[in-house]
Image: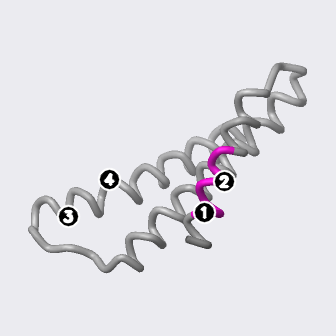
Amino acid sequence: MEKVKWFMYTVAGLLIVIPTIYVIISDTSFSSVTSNILISIAILLVIFGKLISVMDKKKENRSYAVDIGAIIGLLTVFILRIFL
């Protein structure tokens, strides 16, 4: 599960970095819908990665309160992005 978690984090980072670099280099822009979709997918991938981290820590009887806080915060941001 560790490899899947880091794959999700990497893809989420690339979903943010690659379009940003493209916009900076080509001096064009994406539509707001495309930007919102890419950012929302990146947030969801980070949330799923954190859920995997919580499951792994729960199996090892380690503290996972920080991960739960991150999940709650990211879910709040995700829900606000959808409805506002």
Dots 1, 3 in contact, CB < 8 A: no
Q: Give the residue number, with chain letter if any, for mark 4.
A: 17
Specify the segment rendered in magenta: 73-80
Find residue 31 and report its image quarter. bottom left
Whichever of callouts 4 and 1 sits on the residue coming sooner in the sequence is: 4
State how the image is colored.
Answer: one colour
Q: Which mark is residue 80?
A: 1
Q: Is residue 13 magenta?
A: no
Q: Which mark is residue 76?
A: 2
> Badge 3: few (under 14), some or many (20 or more) residues near its Cα, within 10 Å?
few
**Residue depicted at 81% across the width and 20% down the height:** 63
| x and y percentages locating residue 58 in the rendered image | 88, 30
**Three-letter amino acid code at disc 4?**
Val
**Residue depicted at 48% across the width and 72% down the height:** 37
| x and y percentages locating residue 60 in the rendered image | 87, 23
| Closer to us: 9 or 66 | 66
**Residue depicted at 61% across the width and 72% down the height:** 83
Dots 2, 1 in contact, CB < 8 A: yes
Dots 2, 3 in contact, CB < 8 A: no
> Badge 2: few (under 14), some or many (20 or more) residues near its Cα, within 10 Å?
few
Up-down: is 70 above or below 12? above
Q: Quadrant of the C terminus?
A: bottom right
**Three-letter amino acid code at disc 3?**
Tyr
Q: Give the residue number, with chain letter if any, for mark 3.
A: 22
